[in-house]
Image (cartoon, helix red, strand yellow):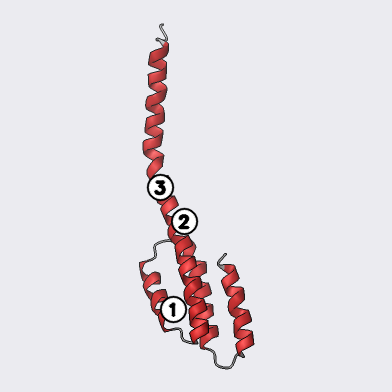
Amino acid sequence: MELGSISEWVTAFAEIAAVCVALFLPYYEKRQERNKRSRNLRLIFKGFIKDALEENSTKKLESYYKISYLVNDNENDEQVFSLVQQAIKIINDDEIKPEQKNKDIQEIINCFD
């Protein structure tokens, strides 16, 4: 039984490595893209929440929230959407004092980091 030359072994290992890369690279790239979209979503909502608090209006925030919720396919973003819902409720609640609103919204914004 002949084991073959070193060049044949190197070629076989290179082919195995190429197959592994071909199988797992799309998964890795998809995961990286999903993480990037999640990060961008958090940053955008963070800005929208700050603007909504300053303007005391949640129209833009609610619009972006609805659109993002409908097109989102990442289950990991459910916490982000939950935080946005809480922020909308706090900003729209006229019974909460402005100082308390600022404090509560700041806590929500800190959760995005």
Q: Is residue 26 visible?
A: yes
| Residue 63 image point, x, y percent | 39, 79
| Whether residue 75 can be seen here | no
Structural crowding at the residue carrying mark 3, measured as other residues with C-alpha within 10 Å and reported as few (<14), some (14–19) or many (≥20): few
Q: Secondary structure at mark 1?
A: helix
How would you rate the neighbour count of disc 1 (Cα within 10 Å): few for under 14, some for 14-19, many for 20 or more? many
Q: Quadrant of residue 13?
A: top left
Q: Label 2, secondary structure: give it.
A: helix
Residue at 48% over, 86% down? 55
In this rendering, position of residue 32 left or right of residue 98: left
Q: Which residue is mark 3?
A: 29
Reading the image, the residue beneath label 2 is 35
Q: Is residue 10 above or below residue 80?
A: above
The kind of residue tagged 2 is: Asn
Amino acid on which the number 1 mark rests in the picture = Leu
Q: In the picture provided, is 26 more to the left or to the right than 84? A: left
What distance separates the C-alpha of mark 2 from that of mark 1? Answer: 22 Å
Lower sequence index among marks 2 and 3: 3
Horizontally, residue 5 falls left or right of residue 89, namely left
**Badge 3 amino acid:** Glu
Measuring from the top left, give residue 80's x and y in whole percent. Answer: 50, 69
